[in-house]
Amino acid sequence: MKFGKEFKREMVPEWIEAYVDYTGLKQILQEIRRFKESKQPPTPATSLDQRLALYRNFSGLNLQGGVQNTGDIENQVIAVNTVPHENYRKFYKTKFLASPEGAENEIIFFDKLDHEFNKVNTFYKDKVDEVMREVTLLNKQMDALIALRIKVMDPGFNAFPSLQSLSLDINNSTPSRITSPLRMTVIDTDDMPVSPSFDPTYGRQVSMTNASYSKLPVNRNSLRENRDTDSQKTDPLEILDHVKIVNTFESPISTIRGVLSESKENDLSYKKEELKKVEHRLKLIFIEFYQKLRHLKHFSYMNLSAFSKILKKYEKITSRKAARSYLKMVDNSYLGSSEEVTSLLDRVETTFIKHFSQSNRREGMKILRPKHKREKHRITFMSGFFSGCSIALLVAVILLRDDRKLIDKDEGTSYLDKIVPLYSFYAYIVLHMLLYAANIYFWRNYKINYAFIFGFKQGTELSYREVFLLSNGLAMLVLAALLMHLHMNSRAEVYGTHIEYVPLGLIMVLLFITFCPFNIIYRSSRSFLIRCVFRCICAPLYKVTLPDFFLADQLTSQVEAIRSLEYYICYYTWIKPSHGHNTCQSHNVYNIFYFILAIIPYWFRFFQCVRRLFEEKDQAQAYNGLRYFLTILAVVIKTAYVLRKSLTWEVLVILSSLITTLFNTYWDIVVDWGLLRRKSKNKFLRDKLILHHKSVYFTAMVLDVLLRFAWLQLVLRFNVHSLRGSTVSSIFACLEVIRRGMWNFFRLENEHLNNVGKYRAFKSVPLPFAYHEEDDHKEE
């Protein structure tokens, strides 16, 4: 792979603008090449030149990499100097020493090269400074954690040396060039009156049981006297007098307490459950912090490689010696000489292994650097096998239907109207899963980091092959049940009422697979889905994350599937199975709930918007909530129109439906997809695009408008007399699922490029402890 493609592929999406413009520099070099060729046409190489080139290539004299063959500095055509800049930062300016005649493009090249290097160097310095500030906070958080461990695990433990920077074990790490909170002095623990069986940094025993350890004699008063003799020594447990637990409002109980209480902080309870929660949150913080450090290190490496590559290309095209001077400046700059990130990586590893993996380096590094998931060949084989079986079963169902002429007979049509709602539920799910598999395929193909955006744990996310396997497996199971149902119905005198238990057994099997506690059939993904569904149901009580509202949006496109569940309940409880669908529709309660169920997904999204509005104070969430409220209102008006048909209600239905559809269409295209930007460099689109063909975006916008109005029929149930039975609702339900699949790709593309949902970038995990001194300074 060429470096340009690799460089683009390895970019951190959040920092794309901060990387060196390698493509722009290459374009300038191409102009220099064309100018050289126009002025001096290349002469054919002599046989001697060819032999010398061949000799150099095979003799090892043609050195690869580095700047060894770029000539002495005295022979360089450039001089790089530092120039003063605001904020006392070093900026670099290159002076072109050769004759400027005919070298205008070369001067432009070095001007742009300086601009790009100063941009990269400044960004890297800012990010490292930001990291160092985070280290200060992490030090204080770890001090509080260690003190809490001591208090919870051994309330009688005493130690008066300061816990300053104990969390990062500076005394055991190699010296570095960092002048930051990480280079704090380390306390001398030789005079600490600590039992050899207790490690204060772990807050646990090493060789004694809990029972024996609780009986260790501790003379606390004598230790306090020793503390008074040395003013520099303080009780580490006094840290706990200045900290509180930060309430993140991530659970219903914490949310209710936060609403009833004015403070967002809770006093320490010194319970083991509290300690576990704090440890879990700090563990996540360290993992995310470590990933950020790795990205910073990779950012430095890729940009340094880009500068080296582009200067080699310059020398090759112009035959001038410039790389050595410039790369010497790069090596001496902050970007090339800073070792803070490398040292921090080592120290974070040491800290994490000691405090969060019980000194097991292998387990700790598995968490910090999880391995990528490997594709399995049996997944591909089983996907093909299930899809082949599904196609064969579908053909068998069609042939059996035609053989019995169910469509031509009135009793056949009645029978299909009875069983189609029982099996169409699975058809909508299978179609949605197939589209999701296609989404994953295109997300991966266009380097959209969907796994990170959704918050999947690395190694547990499903690939498009696995989703395709699940969808085909479900389709095969459903078609087999439908074929069995049709066959048993043809011999009703033999099977009797047992025929009606086939759909019931099918949904029981599906529920068992979904909630199966055993580690089979992707348990981690099933658990993730169940948690997201539960958080959607309890929307106002849980902090809203991107997977939550993304799933709720999917549910808004599965209105007909949700209504099919109501038909299941009606079919097996309210009526006799032989009476079928028409009897369900004769119940007023069934008809009312038929429209109420369409409200539920929008109700979830409405409360999610309300929660985000109060938490983030983002006015856009108010408009988004209004959008879902208008949809709910449109469905309610339609329900009233069905119950009390009149001209007034009909006019209200048309107006509310049109307003809701137009609002939703505008939000899809402008907000969710970020398109139709008038000032964009891509006319009527947006500045950043992943797809190369712009016509795809315009086609998607047109399809979204058309399918939105098709969705109008699905929710509001307009009748099309040319089609009979449940065919109309099934067709429009499938169209809405297809529209949602298309929406998914462009929504996540926009999230990946522009972070419109404010969830991407590096995951922000709230700190568990809040220091009173910090709050006092803020108030002052």
Image (cartoon, grey):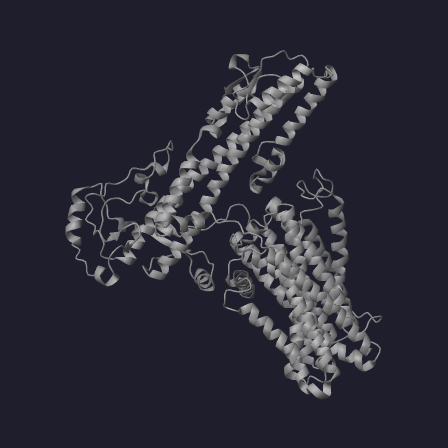
Q: Residue at x 42, y 40 (%)?
A: 345
Can you say whether 570 is above or below 269 in the image? below
Q: Residue 76 appears in which quarter of the rendering?
A: top right
Q: Nearer the viewer, residue 744 or 673?
A: 744
Residue drawn at x 47%, y 62% is 251
The answer to whether residue 159 is above or below residue 625 is above
Position in image of residue 528 (x %, y %): 53, 61
Q: Residue furthest bottom?
A: 493
Residue 631 appears in the rendering: no
Tell me if 217 is positioned left or right of 660 in this view: left
Query: Residue, x 36% and y 38% (percent of image)?
Result: 182
In the displayed structure, 174 sits above or below 96; it is: below
State left or right for residue 33 relative to residue 113: right
Residue at horizontal 56%, vertical 66%?
Answer: 537
Location of the N terminus by quadrant is: top right
Residue 635 % position (x, y)? 69, 68
Instruction: Determine which quarter of the picture holds residue 247.
Output: bottom left
Give coordinates of residue 23: x percent, y percent. Answer: 64, 31
33 versus 589 height, above or below: above
